[in-house]
Image (cartoon, grey):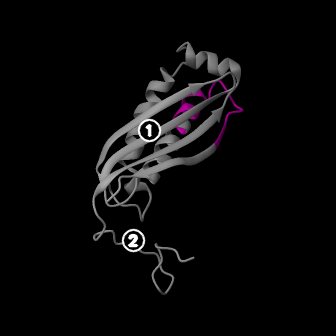
């Protein structure tokens, strides 16, 4: 299996997508952060000293999706149409799901992964003073879709 980001001599390169059609695409990334039940309750009740954790995490995730190509060297800048975030709050964890949509020549997988990762990191940052044992885990792509040509 060859890597599309390497040229014939093994050097890194950006993939040329100029001949691919512009089509509707969507990607969903997911991750979770494990927290103490006390921290989950503080987040739910909006009692974390730094503020409304999930609102800030949502904004951070949207920014991350929009800036993905600035963070990942071979990632193409893409015209994002929408970034949607959902949080599932359980007793000891928060699951983050980021859905990124747009019309482009390549997919939005990296944007969805960046958004879900940064949402988890933002939760971590906002809660680190009250919970020293948080764990971010299971960052993964759960779905990608493109319209038929």
Point out the residue furthest to the front here.
148
The N terminus lies in quadrant? bottom right
**Residue 67 lies in the magenta stretch:** no
Residue at x 48% of width, y 20% of height: 51
Q: Which residue matches tag 1?
A: 61
Residue 130 x, y percent position in the rendering: 64, 23
Residue 4 lies left or right of residue 132; in this view the side is: left
Residue at x 43% of width, y 36% of height: 60
Q: Is 119 placed above or below 37 here?
A: below
Q: Residues within 10 Å of mark 2 (few under 14, many from 20)?
A: few
Q: Earlier in the sequence, mark 2 or mark 1?
A: 2
- Camera-side residue: 78 or 73? 78
Q: Is 53 placed above or below 116 here?
A: above
Point out the residue furthest to the bottom here.
9
**Alpha carbon separation for disc pair 2 and 1:** 25 Å
The C terminus lies in quadrant? bottom left
**Residue 130 lies in the magenta stretch:** yes
- Camera-side residue: 135 or 147? 147
Label 1 secondary element: helix
Q: Is 53 placed above or below 25 here?
A: above
Q: Which residue matches tag 2?
A: 14
Residue at x 45% of width, y 33% of height: 85
Q: Residues within 10 Å of mark 1 (few under 14, many from 20)?
A: many
Residue at x 51% of width, y 41% of height: 116
Question: Are the two marked residues, 2 and 1, in contact with CB atoms closer than 8 angstroms?
Answer: no
Residue 12 x, y percent position in the rendering: 46, 75
Residue 132 x, y percent position in the rendering: 69, 31
- Numbered badge on residue 77: none
Q: Write the start and end of the magenta stretch as one range.
A: 121-137
Q: Is 142 placed above or below 123 here?
A: below
């Amino acid at each position: 299996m060859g890597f599309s980001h390497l040229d014939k001599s093994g050097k890194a390169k950006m993939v040329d997508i100029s001949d691919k059609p512009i089509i509707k695409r969507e990607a969903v990334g997911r991750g979770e952060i494990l927290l103490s039940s006390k921290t989950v309750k503080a987040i739910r009740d909006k009692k974390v000293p730094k503020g409304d954790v999930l609102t800030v995490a949502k904004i951070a995730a949207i920014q991350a999706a929009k800036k993905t190509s600035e963070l990942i060297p071979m990632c193409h800048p893409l015209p994002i149409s929408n970034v949607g975030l959902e949080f599932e709050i359980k007793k000891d964890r928060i699951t983050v799901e980021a859905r990124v949509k747009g019309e482009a020549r390549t997919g939005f997988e990296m944007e969805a992964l960046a958004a879900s990762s940064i949402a988890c990191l933002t939760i971590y940052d906002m809660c680190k003073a009250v919970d020293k044992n948080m764990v971010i885990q299971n960052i993964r792509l759960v779905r990608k879709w493109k319209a038929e040509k």
